[in-house]
Structure formats: structure tokens, C-alpha cells
Image (tube, rainbow, N blue to C red):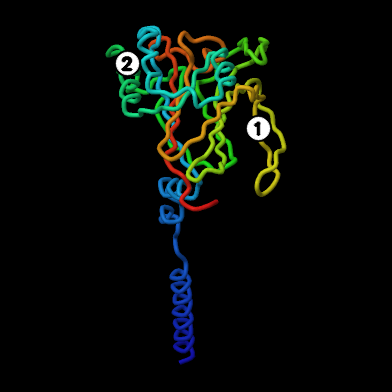
């Protein structure tokens, strides 16, 4: 009887242990297979970010073969652009540095003409374009959510490898610098205006160059380490526009391309054909509530 009792007690203890293990297993959940629920969806995250921003820009990069087309064909684009929206003095400085800018006043005609001019010349160029083979210049389009007062750096082309002499005309004087691996961009900053439904867009030509260096910089929440290259910023060439939702602006090099505009907005295609970049900046979305 003692032996039977001991066996019964052992059986009961084993049953209790199994029950405890089962209960423990039931309370544990394998979350590794549900990573899609815990990780944010990139599309949803972008939509949420875009809706919370004050403004959304749609930026298009359109390389055209200006040498093949000829100056008259390229100049035909400007019949639908108002260049007078830029201060006359600033416009002269920009033209002296090879940059031409304005506000598109007839968007459908302008975009139709630009689409025709930016079409690849032959089947080889079409194939390379569709295969997304790298070129010197930026291409395609992107939507950029932005906040008032926060700048966004818009690369115009890939960095030029090695040393490059850059010449700029400022205050009637020509200034030259030798830059290492220069990278051309437009720094865009939106700001509020006193006019309802209107914002100001400031576009500043800049060239980043040299080796990246770490710096302590303040942010909204704390001080952080930022790794950046040196920047030659041309505040005397700031491009300032005032516009509302649906307005479109254009930035490109002069024809023929010269000076800073040539360096920043011209380069070779994948088939080694010289191209000139036309940048369209459209205000796609204005704030729905006051920020």
C-alpha cells in the first residue's frame, strides 16, 4: 500500500507540473511572426508624415539634350514662364552666373513642350533611361513633405570626382575656389507670408565639398552629432518665390550654359551625351490648419 501511495503521489505531482508548464506556455506569445503588425508600414508612415506637414512640394528633374535641340528650341519653353516674379537685380545676378528661373504661367503647354524636349533621341538612350542607368544629373520626380522654416537639400547632380575650380560672380567681382568632390544642390526653405493661401519658397544654390566632418548641432529635442561636408552657400543668389497651391516654378541653366549654372545643372547622360537639367517645383499641398 505504501508503494501504491507513493506512486499515486508521484503521479499527482507530475500532473501538476505538466499543468503548470502548459499554463506557462499558454501565457507566452511568439511575436516574431507578427512583425508586420508591430513594424510601421512605410506607405502609411509617409502618408501620416505628409498629412502632418504644412506643405508638400512635387519636384521634377528633367534632363534635356540642349546641344542636340539647339538654343531656339530650348528657348521656346520660356514663352510660358514669367521671369518678372524675381527682383530685377537678383535676376541679373542669376543670369550672370548662368542660372535662369521663373514661374510657369501656362502649365499644360509648358509641361507638354518640356516632355517633348526631354524625350531621349534614339532607342539606345530610351533603353538606358528605362534601365535606370546612372547619369550625372538627377532625374525623375519626388513628393517632399516640409515644415515652415525647415530646409530641404535638393541634389541637382551626382558629386564631381576630384578637384573642380568653381567661379562665381558676386557684387560685380569674380570669385574662384578649388573644391574637392563638389556636390551641387538647392536648399529649399518654405516660410509663411501675410497673404492667406500664399507661402514663400526660398531656394539657395549651394555646393558641398571636401571630407565629411562631425559637429555637435542643436536639434528640437537635444544636441546631436551631425556628419556634414563643408558648404559654399550663395545667399546673394537666393531665389525667392511667393505662391499658392498648384503654382509651379522652374530653375535651369542658361542657354548656352555658363559659370555656376553649367557646373550645377549640366552633365553627361548614360550614353555620354551632354545634358542640361530643368527643375520644376510645384506646390502640391498647402496646410489645411494653422500650424
Residue furthest toward the bottom? Answer: 1
Question: Alpha-carbon distance for marks 1 and 2?
Answer: 38 Å
Which residue was labeled with disc 1? 227
Residue 123 in sight in this render? yes
Label 2 Cα crowd, 10 Å radius (few <14 / some 14-19 / many 20+): some
| Residue 36 image position (x, y, % from top left) | 41, 52
Q: Nearer the viewer, residue 64 or 183?
A: 64
Quadrant of the rendered structure where residue 93 is? top right
Left or right: residue 224 versus residue 276 is right
Mark 1 neighbour class, 10 Å CA radius: few under 14, some 14 to 19, many 20 or more: few
Q: Residue at left 70%, top 44%?
A: 223
User: What residue did someone put label 2 on?
Assistant: 120
Q: Nearest the camera: 229 or 16? A: 229
Residue 127 in sight: no
Q: What residue is drawn where x is 57% and y is 12%?
A: 96
Q: Is residue 218 left or right of residue 158?
A: right
Residue 227 picture quarter:
top right
Q: Looking at the picture, how far across and down is residue 208, in whole percent?
A: 61, 23
Amino acid at each position: 500500500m505504501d508503494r501504491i501511495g507513493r506512486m499515486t503521489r508521484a503521479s499527482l505531482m507530475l500532473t501538476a507540473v505538466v499543468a503548470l508548464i502548459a499554463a506557462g506556455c499558454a501565457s507566452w506569445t511568439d511575436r516574431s511572426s507578427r512583425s508586420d503588425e508591430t513594424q510601421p508600414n512605410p506607405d502609411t508612415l509617409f502618408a501620416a508624415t505628409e498629412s502632418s506637414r504644412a506643405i508638400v512640394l512635387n519636384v521634377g528633374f528633367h534632363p534635356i539634350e540642349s546641344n542636340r535641340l539647339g538654343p531656339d528650341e530650348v528657348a521656346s519653353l520660356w514663352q510660358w514662364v514669367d521671369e518678372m516674379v524675381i527682383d530685377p537685380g537678383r535676376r541679373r545676378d542669376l543670369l550672370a552666373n548662368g542660372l535662369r528661373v521663373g514661374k510657369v504661367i501656362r502649365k499644360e503647354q509648358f509641361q507638354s513642350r518640356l516632355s517633348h524636349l526631354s524625350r531621349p533621341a534614339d532607342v539606345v538612350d530610351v533603353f538606358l533611361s528605362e534601365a535606370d542607368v546612372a547619369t550625372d544629373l538627377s532625374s525623375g520626380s519626388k513628393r517632399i513633405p516640409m515644415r515652415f522654416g525647415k530646409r530641404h537639400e535638393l541634389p541637382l547632380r551626382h558629386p564631381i570626382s576630384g578637384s573642380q575650380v568653381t567661379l562665381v560672380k558676386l557684387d560685380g567681382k569674380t570669385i574662384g575656389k578649388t573644391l574637392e568632390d563638389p556636390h551641387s544642390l538647392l536648399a529649399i526653405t518654405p516660410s509663411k507670408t501675410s497673404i492667406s493661401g500664399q507661402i514663400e519658397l526660398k531656394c539657395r544654390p549651394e555646393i558641398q565639398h571636401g571630407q565629411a566632418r562631425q559637429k555637435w548641432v542643436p536639434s528640437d529635442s537635444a544636441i546631436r552629432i551631425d556628419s556634414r561636408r563643408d558648404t559654399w552657400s550663395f545667399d546673394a543668389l537666393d531665389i525667392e518665390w511667393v505662391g499658392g497651391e498648384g503654382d509651379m516654378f522652374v530653375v535651369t541653366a542658361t542657354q548656352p550654359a555658363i559659370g555656376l549654372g553649367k557646373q550645377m545643372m549640366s552633365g553627361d547622360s548614360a550614353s555620354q551625351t551632354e545634358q542640361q537639367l530643368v527643375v520644376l517645383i510645384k506646390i502640391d499641398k498647402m496646410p489645411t490648419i494653422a500650424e
